[in-house]
Image (cartoon, rainbow, N blue to C red):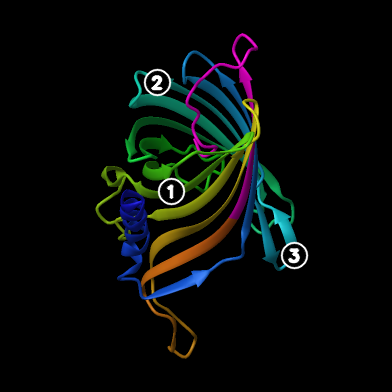
């Protein structure tokens, strides 16, 4: 229990430390994030994954609105009990208006990622660290692609309750743009650009089916310019600004085993 409190405290510290120097914050409308997953279990713990995501924002000026559709394909190879690595390819389809037009255009962004994962235990808890590097290729010609590094720490434990298994979990992920590609005269940016603190409750109904309900707080850490009204009065002070988005999610996963028969394996949480 002491180890759990230590890691939970560390995750909370990482989540709030970029905000310690922040002058202001805003809270956006809640984002609903349902995700359907199909995982194909290969040898041992290796897997292929295909998932479909539909982020939906509630409470906007025009009511509940589906923001975009996301499709992800992933593969992960476990070299031993502690180390694994993999790759993902994500696409996000969305519509937007451009150039004052009243016609929406469809765009599909593509993001490849390579990552490395370390898996060990703290007492009876699983403690994982995931480090990835990705690059977004935006379809919108007005947007520039940028490389992003992401580090995730997560802690969970599996409890057998009758015929089902429960997996409570806590995770924190920090995102930072890679600065070597920025020009010297580019606007100043924060050290951490985004951060997400997430709490899960996974329920494994059978070797083939499980679901995870979760809540999260996602923060964009920015530096904004001072804005004034026509009289010169400061409307928005310049400096650090945190934009927080509450998220409520539900992951539904169906697992297919190679050879059709279920076999013993360590399976990752639905947040792969």
Mark 2 Cα within 10 Å, few/some/many (few <14, many 20+)? some
> Would residue 172 be seen by someone viewing this image from the given angle?
yes
Residue 92's image quarter?
A: top right
The segment highlighted magenta reads 248-272
Spatial distance from mark 1 to mark 2, Cα to Cα? 21 Å
Instruction: Return the residue nearer the eye: 3 or 15.
Output: 3
The residue tagged with tag 3: helix, strand or loop?
loop
User: Relative to 50, does residue 227 appear above or below in the rendering?
Assistant: below
Residue that numbered label 1 is attached to: 171
Spatial distance from mark 2 to mark 3, Cα to Cα? 46 Å
Residue 193's image quarter?
A: bottom left
Residue that numbered label 2 is attached to: 78
**Mark before the other along the chain sequence, 2 or 3:** 3
Residue that numbered label 3 is attached to: 62
User: Relative to 57, does residue 183 appear above or below in the rendering?
Assistant: above
User: Relative to 267, does residue 68 appear above or below in the rendering?
Assistant: below
Q: Is residue 249 magenta?
A: yes
Please identify the residue farthest to the top as the structure is shown: 259
């Amino acid at each position: 229990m002491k180890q759990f409190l230590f890691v939970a405290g560390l995750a909370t510290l990482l989540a709030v430390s970029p905000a310690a120097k922040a002058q202001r914050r805003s809270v956006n409308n809640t984002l609903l994030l349902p995700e359907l997953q199909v995982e194909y279990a290969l040898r041992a713990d290796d897997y292929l994954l295909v998932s479909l995501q539909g982020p939906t924002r509630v409470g906007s000026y025009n009511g509940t609105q589906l923001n975009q559709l996301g499709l992800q394909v992933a593969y992960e190879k476990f070299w031993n009990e502690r180390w694994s690595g993999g790759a993902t390819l994500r696409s996000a389809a969305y519509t937007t208006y451009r150039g004052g037009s009243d016609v929406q255009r469809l765009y599909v962004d593509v993001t490849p990622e390579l990552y490395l994962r370390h898996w060990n235990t703290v007492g009876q808890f699983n403690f994982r660290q995931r480090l990835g590097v990705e690059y977004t290729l935006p379809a919108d010609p007005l947007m520039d692609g940028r490389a992003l590094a992401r580090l995730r720490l997560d802690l969970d434990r599996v409890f057998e309750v009758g015929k089902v298994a429960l997996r409570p979990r806590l995770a924190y992920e920090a995102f930072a743009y890679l600065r070597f590609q920025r020009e010297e005269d580019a606007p100043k940016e924060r050290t951490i650009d985004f951060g997400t603190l997430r709490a899960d409750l996974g329920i494994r109904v059978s070797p083939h089916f499980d679901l995870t309900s979760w809540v999260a707080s996602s923060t964009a850490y920015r530096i904004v310019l001072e804005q004034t009204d026509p009289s010169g009065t400061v409307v928005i002070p310049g400096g650090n600004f945190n934009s927080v988005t509450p998220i409520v999610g539900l992951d539904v996963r169906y697992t297919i085993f190679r050879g059709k028969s279920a076999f013993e394996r360590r399976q990752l949480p639905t947040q792969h």
